[in-house]
Amino acid sequence: MSIDVVILAAGKGTRMRSDLPKVLHPIGGVPMLGRVIDAAQQLGDVAITVVIGHGAATVREQFADSGVQFVEQTEQLGTGHAVAQAIPNFRAGATVLVLYGDVPLVKTGTLQSLLSASDRGPALLSVEMANPAGYGRIVRDDAGRVQAIVEEKDADADTLAIREVNTGILAAPADLLRQWLPELSNDNAQGEYYLTDVIARSVSENITVTGVRASDPLEVAGVNSRAQQAQMERALQHSRALALMNAGVTLLDPARIDVRGRLECDTDVSIDINCVFEGEVTLGKDVHIGPNCLLKNCRLADGTRVEANSIIEDADVGAACTIGPFARLRPGTQLADGAKVGNFVETKKAKIGRGSKVNHLSYVGDAVVGENVNIGAGTITCNYDGVNKSLTEIGDGAFIGSNTALVAPVSVGAGATVGAGSTITREVSADELAVARGKQRNISGWQRPTKKS
Ligand code: UD1
Ligand code: CA
């Protein structure tokens, strides 16, 4: 069965009060429309058409490489009119699946059940709501067969009492919609072309409509305001936190973690409060993350500890390393097993060898550091001359005294020692001692100046 997905994303999203089109606002770090496209693409052989209107250029640009087609709805005349804009993209014999760019947590499995119910006629996704206000009501006959969807504004008191509502998500044979959509009328309370009117039309032609009930209201919830966006974000984060704990991760407070990408954890990982994970993050066995850390696109191997207030981005960290507190590992940092990067240390494009230590207040950028090197407090790799970046190389077992400036390009050989406070501009060979600082002079009997009267 070929599936033609139509995603409605033309509305203004007035209540967001934003310059950014609503469907580009993120949930879990991904624009809402991106989530819907992902869920649809996981169905397999799909052709996706996104109906855009408000902010069309911005939406188009952001999803230019996503493999979807766009059609523009210049005036928002209703959901039926919106889907009709995609008719030229319908393939003969296909099933059309209608989704919404602002209903971001819909699950592929639910869409699959809807699609399997729609091979002969329309299938709609409904949900029971304690408070159905604002939604279209599902009207069934005495035998429980779906008869119509009645919009709130067109409903009488009896209909308003129905708690089964339309999620808006619908699947139907393309060949029926191609015929029905252009024949919709806008003679209703809102003067709109309602997609929902295809249900009564189908019933009038003796084509059975199947109602599929969604079990999880969150999955079919839409976002119309910042408050709803935040609510949905919390709900998503809560479910992610539960999944992590079910997989054996200790979360000191499941309400204070944010995963805005994919976090994969081996056993007995523990994560303290207020940590944010972005992109793809992989944590090995027994990894500990202290409070207030941000980890983005990184891999930390078994037994590594990240202490409070550290930031790690695009980095690869070996086993049994110690990072922080207050460390910043910038892109291109690679720590071998047992390396230590301590407080107020910044690294960038730095390879730090097994067992090496950069414990305090240093900047190590564009550097290759060997094994068991000790880099003293306040050491700086001067990697930038204002135009070009240059490399600093430090051999195994070298000792760099505190407050050293290593003016790159420069290398310090294995086993070499650099005296504290040195400014190193020339190569230091293996096992040499380099001291590059003013010699100490002591003047005895020194008289301090006295205050003039
Ligand atoms: C629609 C359904 C209602 C259902 C509700 C679920 C109709 C007539 N009613 O209500 O039964 O309970 O969704 O939320 O379908 N859009 C366009 N172009 C348009 C109109 C809408 O792209 O011309 C998009 C909007 O951006 C939005 C979505 O379609 O993402 C739904 O539109 P909205 O006006 O919120 O739907 P309702 O009329 O409230
Ligand atoms: Ca409307």
Image: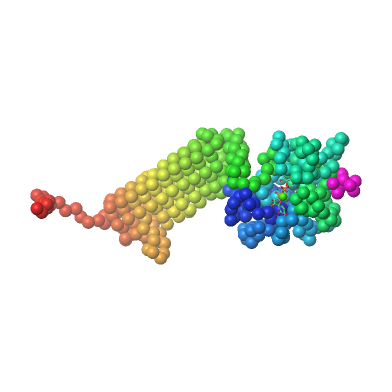
Q: Nearer the viewer, residue 239 or 103?
A: 103
Given the current orientation, which residue lies at the most extreme right position? 206
Q: Magenta stretch: residue 205 in it? A: yes
Is residue 108 among what the camera can see?
Answer: yes
Given the current orientation, which residue lies at the most extreme bottom position? 387
Q: Is 304 displayed left or right of 239 in the figure?
A: left
Q: Magenta stretch: residue 290 in it? A: no
How many marks overall? 0
Residue located at (44% from left, 43% from top): 309
Over which residues does the magenta segment extend?
Answer: 200-208
Residue 329: x percent and y percent? 45, 49
Residue 222: x percent and y percent? 67, 45
Residue located at (49% from left, 37% from top): 272
Q: Is 299 displayed left or right of 430 in the figure?
A: right
In the picture shown, does residue 410 fall above or below 99?
Answer: below
Residue 429: x percent and y percent? 32, 57
Residue located at (51% from left, 51% from top): 314
Q: Is 51 displayed left or right of 445 in the figure?
A: right
Q: Nearer the viewer, residue 43 or 145?
A: 145
Q: Nearer the viewer, residue 405 or 279?
A: 279
Residue located at (53% from left, 38% from top): 256
Residue 141: x percent and y percent? 86, 38
Here the colouring is: rainbow
